[in-house]
Image (cartoon, rainbow, N blue to C red):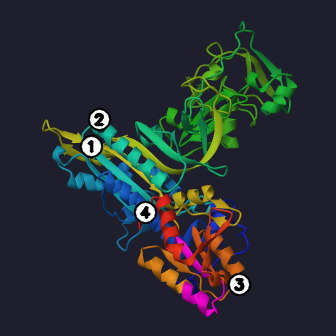
Amino acid sequence: MKLSKMLISTLREVPTEAEVWSHKLMLRAGMIKKMSSGVYNYMPFGIKVIKKIEEIVRGEMDSANAQEFLASMLLTSELLIESGRENIFGEELFKLKDRHQRELCLAPTHEEAFADIARNEIKSYKQLPLNLYQIQTAYRDEKTPRFGVIRSREFIMGETCSFDENNEGLDISYNKMYNAYNNIFTRCSLKCKDVEADAAASGASASLEFVVKSEVGEEEIIICSTCGYAANMENAPSNSEPGEKEAFKELKKTLTPNVKTIEELAKFFNTTNKKFAKTLIFKADDRVVAVMVRGDRQLNESKVINAIGGAVKFELADEETVMRATSAEIGFAGPIGIVSDILLVDVEVASMYNFMVGANDTGYHYENVNYERDIKGGVGDYRKAAQGDKCTKCGSELTLDRGIEVAHIMKLGTTYSQSMGATFIGQDGKNMPLVMGWYGIGIDRTMAAIIEQHHDENGIKWPMALAPYQVVVVPVSIKDEEQMRIAVEIYNSLKQIGVEVLMDDRNERVGVKFKDLDLIGIPIRITIGKKISEGSVEFKLRCAEDNEIIEIGSVIDRIKQEFANNNITL
């Protein structure tokens, strides 16, 4: 392809809306163009990369004996009601009605479509195991789209669903897909970490996320460098720090005027944050839930939601609700005498002695509170794991990191098949629910994550297998007939052997061309300049600092060598 005929719209300035490298470079390189908040058009260079990632996904799914199909972007509301996900997604669903006033939605993901096909097409155990996959666009009305295609309202997903007779079969399917996803990320030159994820929220028995480490990632992950254990913060347990044993002291109500925060209380009582237990009050649908964690800890909302059996809407209680529950202003809530539907006590708080809490009376706190003697509640792990906590596997210290989730695999079991009536006749002649696994990879998120790992201050550094074009031939002066003749010869020779090659025949200064090509990230650049009089051209790898001067006759062999180094067959 000749660049003079291409739609290319690179930007010199960084768009003010872009916060992360992938977003900045995708906009500047003309890979994407914003249509509205969280909605982007993929331009010619961008869609070529997307298609290459899709083909890698297809190749690994086909190797895992999955069969491709294509579900509709539209889901009927009846399907989402059957699965129970209409309430879970709530306002994130894009809803519409057809001319007959039947309610539809744009699919947020397609588990219901998979289950609907299975319940209509799978009749007998003889059809199992079965693995279906698709690459399709999904939609969510994100409240705060950000980071370009990392958190957008419209995104491309590779979705796979496995159907088995039993859990043993599910284990085999799950492991196949785990290996397939690892192969995908290896082929994409993407360094990923698989981390344990929250399974309870989806009804799964096991759940793993593939996370790319990134300072700007929305996922918080806890890692043990000793044993390799890793978990999403939503799911990460940690060993509690037991309180120092003391004899119970007499409960005492103390005046604490205008002292509300843990930091203010620690200063007021001349002690540390660890001597307090804070009581946080939430509204979980129509229930009031109070949760206690140690003063220096952060609450893990996912653990709380799982502990109360789920909630469609879970949020901090408003001032009116707090007043009804505690008869006090915000800042003085405590467990003694609180009016709530549920009281949860973190296991660390349950092991403390003579600690302090709000007195449910504006301007007062209790001293010398002890679990069981003064309060009772559901004891469990409700806090966020933190840097320096002990690993539950080996006892070493945990470290906190951030990352971008690019894929998620789950053992769904019979969660969807039971709710949607997806059954089969087993070998014993009985009707049984299908045992399902679900596996999803974000195609455009993967693209963004690759850029996060492969870039410099000049632009993108695409791995050879993913670059929109692998080689670019650059004549320094398009007015020089000899330069153009040799450029066209090399360009045509590369096309004939199957190389995806560009020729930058634009009437621009060579410095402008180089800046654009580095920004776009073409892996190999062949520059045709004055050295052709000596029978030589300039050979430059995007990932290398220095240029090479090579003979014109060796260009094809040199490029074949680079392709072989990148395991690409011509």
**Among the 4 quarters of the image, the one containing residue 497:** bottom left
Please name which of the two marks, 3 or 4, marks the residue nearer to the observer. 3
Residue type beneath disc 1: Asp
**Residue position marked by numbered label 1 in the rendering:** 164
Residue closest to the eye, 379 or 65: 65
Residue type beneath disc 3: Arg
Residue type beneath disc 2: Glu
Can residue 426 be seen here? The reply is: yes
Residue closest to the eye, 487 or 472: 487
Please name which of the two marks, 1 or 3, marks the residue nearer to the observer. 3
Please name which of the two marks, 4 or 1, marks the residue nearer to the observer. 4
Question: Is residue 117 positioned above or below 434 on the image?
Answer: below
Determine the secondary structure under disc 4: helix
Looking at the image, do the residues carrying marks 4 and 1 touch, with CB atoms under 8 Å apart? no
Report the span colored magenta: 469-486
- Distance between mark 4 and mark 1 Cα atoms: 26 Å
Please name which of the two marks, 2 or 4, marks the residue nearer to the observer. 4
- Distance between mark 3 and mark 4 Cα atoms: 36 Å
Task: Identify the residue at the far front of this view.
Answer: 534
Q: Say the numbered circle drawn on residue 54.
A: 4
